[in-house]
DNA sequence: GCGAAAACCTACCGACTATTCGCTTTTCGT
DNA sequence: ACGAAAAGCGAATAGTCGGTAGGTTTTCGC
């Protein structure tokens, strides 16, 4: 891949550039979480980081690219908490419930971001629409596989469809977030999720 | 309340004014449903109705007032389909499921509106925040009462908490909407809702 | 059919938006 | 320590936003 020419030296980024990018993405997560993508402004994000709007756009050349970065960071955070490489089983479900609890108590900003953006992105023209469609497909197949394994192991109650249980679990997760964000004291998301799962299982969680 | 003066005649609205207001509210529902309240513009709504922005603002003096009108119309539509005066019972739950099916097939715009606005309104500064908090409280107590009646009638499975079942039903409804809006063929909301309820009940729906 | 109020318009305001251009400052390999 | 590239900034672009001012047209009670 090295050119045969006089070895161009495209010069790398500065040492602290990666940190700056990270700061911007964190601020972007906050702003998009409270105002959504469409109403959240680059100016406000730049203000939070403490730089000018033009300076920010040196790192992300437009708003959509910034959104992509924010979503990528979000995925990194989630997958570093759940073991997606392990074979799907009841441990997958347990990990999912733990993640819900972790998000609510340690990174509530992520909950806001997901809730607001996923609703906004239901519009087919939204720049994050395809991302959310793909992501829901992936989570669905992931959870469905877990419930299918559990059925084979006799851990699923009679008459429960694995795919429907997976869809229900995702829906329950999303819906609880709305109620929780509207009133954070009225609800324990992980507890309600266990209440949902209990009648579906023959074993304890 | 009548002044003792020469009987002012404040003159009523024109005959077709009520219709115009209605047209505006319908258009507002559509625009807010696809773009949300913050990004949806009065100009676009006026364009849909076929009038100028200033003309629209003669009927609703500002954007928040228009939003209030849209939410009010939405409530009228919902309550004209569910009998809220009848005593809470399993019929309440059945009506709720029927309403979900009706919304999905007859007025999908209402589903979009609820999904997008409820997520947007989780922010405490949102002009519809208080509305959604109050509405969720009301629906919650309504459904909780229904499940409590069912428990007294032996229609609730053992170990099911009525309030938790009500919260779960609301969450399931909201969450299914997101998945359905992302891919309307991948899901039957009413069917999934019945799958959620079945393990909670000792009787058929 | 007169007149007053309602309905509606064009034009405009100030504030905000994303993005671009040209310039200065900072970094860092050589 | 030189110089080129990266990082950052101020200003300007063209566009949209909610809302207002002032005038014109339509309605309708009398």
Image (cartoon, coloured by chain):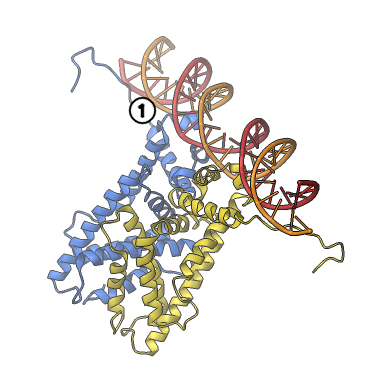
Chain colours: A blue, B yellow, C red, D orange
Q: Position of residue A165 (x, y in %)?
A: 25, 67
Q: Is residue B51 visible?
A: yes
Q: Residue at x 49, y 48 (%)?
A: A35
Horizontally, residue B82 falls left or right of residue B203, namely right
Given the current orientation, which residue lies at the most extreme right position? B5
Q: Is residue A174 visible?
A: no
Q: Residue at x 21, y 64 (%)?
A: A163
Query: Which quadrant would the N terminus of chain A be assigned to in this image?
Result: top left
Q: Position of residue A194 (x, y in %)?
A: 32, 71
Image quadrant assignment for residue B99: bottom left
Are there few (<14), some (14-19), or many (20+) residues within 10 Å of tag 1?
A: few
Q: Position of residue A168 (x, y in %)?
A: 29, 66
The residue singled out by tag 1 in the image is A13
Depth order, front residue of A156/B113: B113
Horizontally, residue A161 falls left or right of residue A100, namely left
Given the current orientation, which residue lies at the most extreme bottom position? B153
User: Chain letter of disc 1?
Assistant: A
């Amino acid at each position: 891949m090295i050119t045969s020419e006089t070895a161009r030296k495209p010069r790398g980024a500065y040492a602290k550039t990666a940190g700056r990018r990270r700061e911007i993405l964190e601020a972007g997560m906050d702003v998009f979480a409270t105002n959504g993508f469409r109403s959240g402004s680059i100016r406000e994000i730049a203000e939070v980081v403490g730089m000018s709007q033009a300076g920010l756009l040196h790192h992300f050349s437009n708003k959509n690219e910034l959104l992509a970065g924010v979503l990528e960071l979000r995925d990194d955070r989630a997958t570093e908490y759940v073991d997606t490489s392990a074979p799907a089983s009841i441990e997958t479900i347990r990990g999912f419930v733990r993640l819900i609890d972790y998000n609510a108590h340690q990174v509530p900003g992520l909950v806001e971001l997901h809730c607001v953006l996923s609703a906004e992105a239901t519009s087919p023209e939204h720049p994050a629409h395809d991302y959310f469609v793909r992501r829901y497909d992936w989570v669905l197949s992931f959870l469905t596989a877990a419930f299918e394994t559990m059925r084979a192991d006799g851990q699923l109650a009679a008459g429960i469809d694995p795919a429907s249980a997976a869809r229900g679990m995702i829906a329950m997760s999303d819906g609880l977030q709305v109620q929780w964000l509207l009133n954070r004291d009225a609800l324990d998301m992980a507890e309600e999720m266990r209440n949902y799962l209990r009648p579906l299982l023959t074993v304890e969680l």
